[in-house]
Amino acid sequence: MKPKVEVKPGSNGSKSKYWIEEHFKYIALSTHDPENLPLVIEKGEGVWLYDVDGNKYIDFSSGISVCNLGYPTHPEIKKTVLEQLEKLAHGAGTDFFNPYQVELAKKLVSITPGEFAKKVFFSNSGTEANEAAVKLVRQATGRKIIIAFYGGFHGRTMGSLALTASKNVQKKGMFPWMPGVIHVPYPNPYRNPWHIDGYEQPLELVNRVLEFIEEYVLDKLISPEDVGAVIAEPIQGEGGYVIPPKMFFTELKKTMDKYGILFIDDEVQMGLGRTGKMFAIEHFNTAPEIMTLAKALSGGVVPIGATVFRSDLDFKQPGVHSNTFGGHALACVVALKTIEIVEKLLPRVQKLEKLFNDELRPLREKIDKVGDVRGLGLAWGVEIVFDKKSKKPDPQTRNKIIKSALEKGLVLLPCGKNSIRLIPPLVISEEEAKLGLEIFKDAVLSVAR
């Protein structure tokens, strides 16, 4: 029996409207969009979400790349949680010791790129993992400046906010944030300051970015001896699911190594199998000195963040950095089991990449409003423009497509100024993936034409 969605006409029913109204009465404004995403989730099963009005949707959002193992809880994860709750949940892992955080740290050290000794700092989220990375760099090197990229997203706390440059609303009214961050262009093949077609001329684009960093930033603006690290997402998430040319990170690393500048790899959104490899940076054959993780690390069950770093960068004395929930016993055990399951899912993700590629890329040729299609594994972005010639971003049409898809039974999320991300749970079947892609294509055709 083929999978199917079950969405009633006028799907935003009375129960949904009630809970949305109550939400805005009692909960602070965040990133909700009741006009285009009026979804009030009541429960989930596998890759399916059900709203309070009884509608059934296929999910291509994965809780912002958190629920990689689907809903509500993968059976192996559920078993792990129940067993661990009989032993210990929170044990003040930054003051006392427990074996669970040690076992998870050992696993992370063994699977992250880099043939050097590593250690791990545990926290609760991606922004905290990046804050820890900045502290490690500054205290270990004595260098205070960090280079980040336009389009990058690294969190919203006042330290990591300084690194973020994907939407100006994220910083609006918040100055001053952490000083000492310099932004440079990211090698976006479709949209960059030099108007280079990075798909046709990838090396030219990479050279322009590196030239900008060396000749303008490190020569004219700041001394390389003051720069501690460069931070980047291997694939920009919130910035639009942007994939740089394959040689970019190896060339960037060579350039940074000349000046003793460290590389922080932010894997918060792309890590844990999303791209068909455990970590997205593996597609680029580069070993960062520091890697940050969160989101999918515990399968959406318990918040956890991790900063994996070259061991000689460790904090020099107790108390320089800590937190309350880091090394949370339950979170660590769940993360270990999550990694074990994801390792088995990688061949599935690699196989489904071809399906997504074959179904999505033709849209770029057929539809004038589809400016670009890019993706790896189950991480895909579709950029919507007014027309191919101008490449002018068209966020209004993007939003209409997302709304139309929801009305047809598919849950999507926006990213960047005018892109749509398609990121289903890694447990999705081929039939379920085909259904979601058909709904997406139908929504694009019905709106963009």
Image (tube, grey):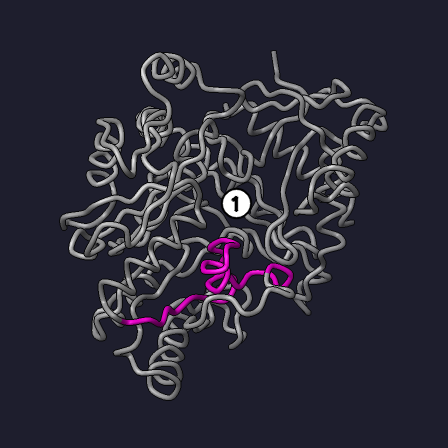
Q: Which residue sits at x=56%, y=51%?
A: 373
Q: Is residue 1 magenta?
A: no
Answer above or below: position of 237 versus 430.
below
Q: Amino acid at mark 1?
A: Trp
Question: Residue 155 or 7: which is nearer the viewer?
Answer: 155
Where residue 183 appears, as percent x and y from the top left, is: 46, 71
Label 1 secondary element = strand
The residue that label 1 is drawn on is 380
Q: Which residue sits at x=40%, y=19%?
A: 77
Q: Which residue sits at x=48%, y=30%?
A: 300
Q: Quadrant of the N terminus?
A: top right
Instruction: Give the residue furthest to the bottom.
Output: 220
Answer above or below: position of 334 versus 359.
above
Q: Is residue 367 left or right of residue 342?
A: right
Q: Is residue 1 left or right of residue 300?
A: right
Answer above or below: position of 345 versus 2.
below
Q: Which residue sits at x=49%, y=35%?
A: 66
Where residue 57 appears, as percent x and y from the top left, is: 67, 25
Q: Is residue 247 left or right of residue 446?
A: left
Occupied quadrant, residue 107: top left
Question: Residue 261 or 181: which is nearer the viewer?
Answer: 181
State how many labels appear.
1
Mark 1, other Cα within 10 Å: few <14 / some 14–19 / many ≥20: many
Where residue 301 appears, as percent x and y from the top left, is: 46, 26
Where residue 446 appears, as percent x and y from the top left, is: 78, 42
- Bounds of the magenta segment: 143-170
